[in-house]
Amino acid sequence: MAKVKVKYVCTDCGTESPKWMGKCPGCGAWNTMAEEAETTFKAPVGRGERLRAKEKAKSIIDIESGREPRVPTGLNELNRVLGGGLVPGSLLLVGGDPGIGKSTLLLQTSHALTSQGLKVLYVSGEESVRQTKLRADRLGALSDKLYVLCETNLDLIEEAIADVEPDFLVIDSIQTVYRPDVASAPGSVAQVRECTGQFMRIAKVNGVATVLVGHVTKEGAIAGPRLLEHMVDCVLYFEGERHHSYRLLRAVKNRFGSTNEIGIFDMSEDGLREVLNPSELFLSERPLGVSGSTVVASMEGSRPVLVELQALVAPTHFPSPRRMSSGLDHQRISLVIAVLEKRMGMFMQNQDAYVNVAGGVKLDEPAADLAAAVSIASSFRDLPTKPYDVVFGEVGLTGEVRAVSRAETRVKEALKLGFKRVILPEQSIKGWQPPAGIELIAVRTVADALRAALE
């Protein structure tokens, strides 16, 4: 029996090595080298390869430019994240925790596309066609233009694609598909890489918008080589707390649109429902007249979102105080606490500090710094914040409050939801006319903001 040659491939960057190494020589990550069998095969020369051989380099001035054609998905929140709709021939990767609703989202999208007269092929490698039909019955996603296939062999999937000739293709999931001429188990680095490359060729040559569902690791990243995210045109993450009903769809890569937009859905028994006013949803259970609670105006792409930021400061029982945050960067919270100690004289070295964004939302912009400072100071002094205030601004190390972008859009969202005052950086009120019906309090330092919010 011939001995099978093996090699070791980094699951993060794809670096190959003839022997196992604890640390990847390419990206420096530890314990990411996975064993796989070496294979040599010659890929068939298809239509794409023949056309590519005839192409010549062109001057960038001579290349015609134009907007990519878009196909509306029927879900406005998904269209927002994609940048207006699906681009024919694009390859998308959707990741998320198990049971978060990825299959539900794609099945509803497939049904919405079939209502426009498009043909959809839904390939499931994890569920039988009967299980998919049961979900479709529950969602009301039944159409004679929606074709379902339970298969994991890539050759048989290609035959089904040639037979159905779909306009939209869903592969659920890429980790279950295998290529027979690759001597590795399904889900291995080699299989995922080769199968993704083949689906990319199918999408580009046939003009079929293709969605690949990817498993995630326990850290939340998409499983498989990092090369997978570089090959696709768009990477979407479907996020949400299992104990909450709403879900967030976020783009971390999009060659045809912005990566700052998010789509918000509400999970119900009938499937996913679009949330048209997310600010009202996140503030529906907000307590009034309590210490440590502040409303912050955050920007998610072009959409303003108002969420509640809560803080709790309590005496510690440990040698070193605990600093915990949920929904905000832990390092930013430590920075804000250091500014309060140094510039405001708040002795917090014997106090635990817990900061939470209510509803499980994640804020990754510095505009939440000032709201975090107000919430922490409010809980530390046990002084309630005013219930109809909105706070936003970036906090500097010297205690100054720096300007943030899109201040006018944030203020208009606060006015629409009935808030009376907005505490914002002084530099952010220049260059635009404040709307009537809401009071703007411009501050230069954290001390000014605390006086306006707590006194």
Image (spheres, rainbow, N blue to C red):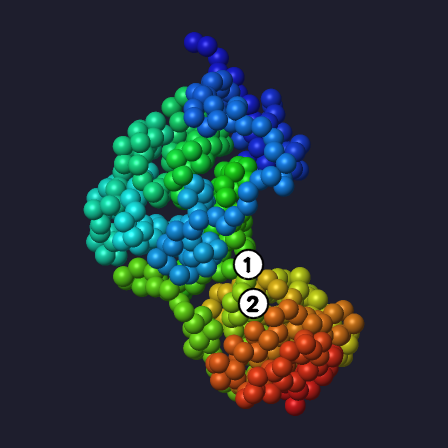
Q: Residue type at mark 2?
A: Met
**Residue at 54% from the left image edge and 28% from the top image edge:** 55
- Rendering coords of residue 212 (x, y %): 41, 42
- Rendering coords of residue 38 (x, y %): 51, 20
Q: Do the residues bearing badges 1 and 2 touch, measured as CB atoms within 8 Å?
A: yes
Q: Which residue is mark 2?
A: 299
Q: Nearer the viewer, residue 34 or 130?
A: 130
10 Å crowding of disc 1: few (<14), some (14-19), many (20+): some
Residue most toward the front? Answer: 62
Q: Nearer the viewer, residue 87 or 377?
A: 87
Kind of element beneath mark 1: loop
- Rendering coords of residue 415 (x, y %): 52, 82
**Residue at 53% from the left image edge and 70% from the top image edge:** 304
Question: Where is residue 30, by image quadrant?
Answer: top right
> Which quadrant, please, contains the C terminus?
bottom right
Residue most toward the top? Answer: 1
Residue 130 visible here: yes
| Precedes in sequence: disc 1 or disc 2 | 1
Residue 131 visible here: no
Count of numbered badges drawn on the protein: 2
Q: Residue type at mark 1?
A: Asn
Q: Nearer the viewer, residue 301 or 389?
A: 301
Question: Which label number is shown at residue 260?
Answer: 1
